[in-house]
Image (cartoon, rainbow, N blue to C red):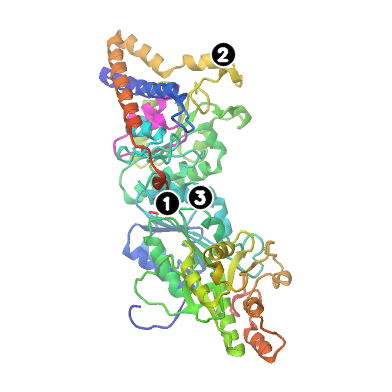
Amino acid sequence: MPEMQRPDITFAAAIREGLDQAMEKDARVIVIGEGVPDPKAIFDTTAGLRDKYGDRRVFDMPLAENGMTGICIGAALSGLRPVMVHQRVDFALLAMDQLINNAAKWHYMFDGKASVPLVVRMIVGRGWGQGPQHSQSLQAMFAQAPGIKVIMPTTAYDAKGMLISAIEDNNPVMFIEHRWLHQIKDSVPEGYYRVPLDQAKVLHEGDAVTVAAFSYMAVEALLAAKALKSAMGIGIEVLDMRSVRPLDVASVLKSVRKTGRLIVADTAFRTGSIAGELISQVAEQAFAALKTHPVRIASPDHPAPTSHFMAKYYYPGPQTIADAVLDMTETGKDTAAYREMCALMLREEPHDTPNRGFTGPF
Amino acid sequence: MNQTYSLSLLRSMLRIRRVEEALANRYAEQEMRCPMHLCIGQEAIAVGVCAALSAEDVVFSNHRAHGHYLAKGGNLNAMVAELYGRATGCCGGRGGSMHLIDLGAGFLGATPIVGGTVPLAVGSAWAASLKRSGRLTVVFFGDGCFEEGVVHESMNFASLHKLPVIFVCENNNFSVYTHRDERQPERPIYRLAEAHGMAAYTGDGNNVEEVLAISRTAVDLARQGQGPQFMELHTYRWREHCGPNFDDHLNYRTVQEIEAGMNGCPIASYTRKLEQEHGDMCLEIAQFEAEIREEIAAAFDFALSSGEPGVDDAQGKVYA
């Protein structure tokens, strides 16, 4: 890891820095999205870019997700490297035709004669009444298409390094950010660096259960890991998957061969999730290593309700993960240690905001 | 227009016609195993528009792409081989008739999702504008595109940023077997382009000189930085929507309409015009026919003697 320490910066600031440095390094990089140059600057992830790079590289966007995706594909085919931004993943559904029919297939169907170096940043909303159409987690839908890469960095360090790698990549890369990660700080090098787009990372070592987690669920899994360790002496291995397609099955297999147990924690709906895909692959390749059936932890199979009274019960969290670990390891819950663990994971913040500082509106 | 140039336009239309007739004739052999959309009857638009472009300009097209590909200079051998699914095809056999490409000729790609390449053309023009390259982009599409939202989204952005793109709408009144009357209200398509704030033209798409004249105006204005240009050109599809045959027996269009459409043959009418102006053209045309026949025979030989791609060829190049 290059150079010296500086104060930790947020995930949002790391994205901004990654964009800035990628634009500085390569004049072909352009950024476009609804609100990119506006005063809110996509949750401050694009702040100052237009001042620095001008209105021929930093663009606001008409409300035309499909058309603009196609236009970015055309620009990518013509030598530019566009970074497109959607404030919510849900808006990108309008662009599925261009993403799946054109971006994903162009390189393949024209026998490798052209490629689409396009990054699409998409933000998964949560809390404060985001509701059915502003909080979906659609990574599995994108990952279904060969030709597309789908990544979900969790830490600020990875956000910057993976964004830079995505921009340098010659393929269409869906860069999915969970809104609740934006304000989490981490140590981030000041310089230009890359993080690979195909590798999971071990966040916490252990030998009782493997928890393969995506995006914000990796944060939750880490909380569970610390509480389990401290109160109950149970060590779980938390893998931050980081990448959805390609899926780093090898790292999960390696861990499962050690623990014999697998939980996959996903931010998405349960049915058809990438969690199910990961479990399928592990079952196919290492069935004998499993001591018990794998478990999916994911959102329930109904849309996220808006009312905070109902949303309170919608999202799985550290408690869900810890309970699943205890069930899997046949550990009793009627103990003082269990109650201590639960207390360690109690959330002080309101359930529907990422932190105390958040007061809405989106 | 000097006679040599006029004859080159005629030859170019004739070549597209004869290539497609040869494809149609051999389709029944069941060796070209892919959907095929012929542009027979619509050749003047491809030829007239491409004649106004320079070699550096680029073109996107759609499912009915043979004419555009050939008029822009796409390699005939690679096209025929592609239809036969051979390794030497322009897509290595991955695309077939609906996916043509020849980057060297500036033919950047054709795909069959209606309206799908329209934003790509605008993106290509956007890149040219940002890079100040002077390159024009043309996209060919049909009247059906105006029912697709993505086309309006694309025109909106092209007009907003005054991009060097030329939209060419080939209006043959049919989407598959459904007449435009059942799909769109009574209003001229080109007026929609005007409403998007761009220069729009309309004309007889079966008159190659008229197409060329409109195209030259559009090309000049686009090169001067006047923004996107739009042309709606009326033409007629002679054969079935997809496949090698005529489809008069389906009765979705009247015999009178078909006759009127075929009477507007761009090649026959242009031949008559040239003969009125310059006298008998039999010798020239006979020579064209002979050259084209030979070229087509060679292209089929090339395709049929090319290797068959194997299972390994299907797997790679998913990612760049």
Residue ranking furthest to the front: A288
| Relative depth, front residue between A244 and A193 | A244
- Rendered image quadrant of residue B19: top left
Q: Which span is picked out in magenta?
A: B40-68
Residue B62 counted in the magenta span: yes
Q: Which residue is mark 2?
A: B256
Does the rendering let one see residue B98? yes
Is residue A5 depicted above or below B192 in this figure? below
Callouts 3 and 1 on one subunit: no
A127 left or right of A123 in image:
right
Q: Amino acid at mark 1?
A: Val
Identified at 38% across, 45% down, the residue is A111
Q: CA distance from mark 3 to mark 1?
A: 13 Å
Callouts 2 and 1 on one subunit: yes
The percent position of residue A32, horizontal first and vertical second, equals 45, 57
Q: Which residue is mark 1?
A: B318
Q: CA distance from mark 2 to mark 3?
A: 43 Å
Q: Amino acid at mark 3?
A: Ile
Does the rendering let one see residue B253? no
The percent position of residue B170, horizontal first and vertical second, equals 47, 29
Q: CA distance from mark 2 to mark 1?
A: 49 Å
Q: Chain of mark 2?
A: B
Q: Which residue is mark 3?
A: A100
Answer few, some or many: residues within 10 Å of disc 3's Cα (few below 14, many 20 plus, some between 14 and 19).
some
The percent position of residue B300, horizontal first and vertical second, equals 35, 27
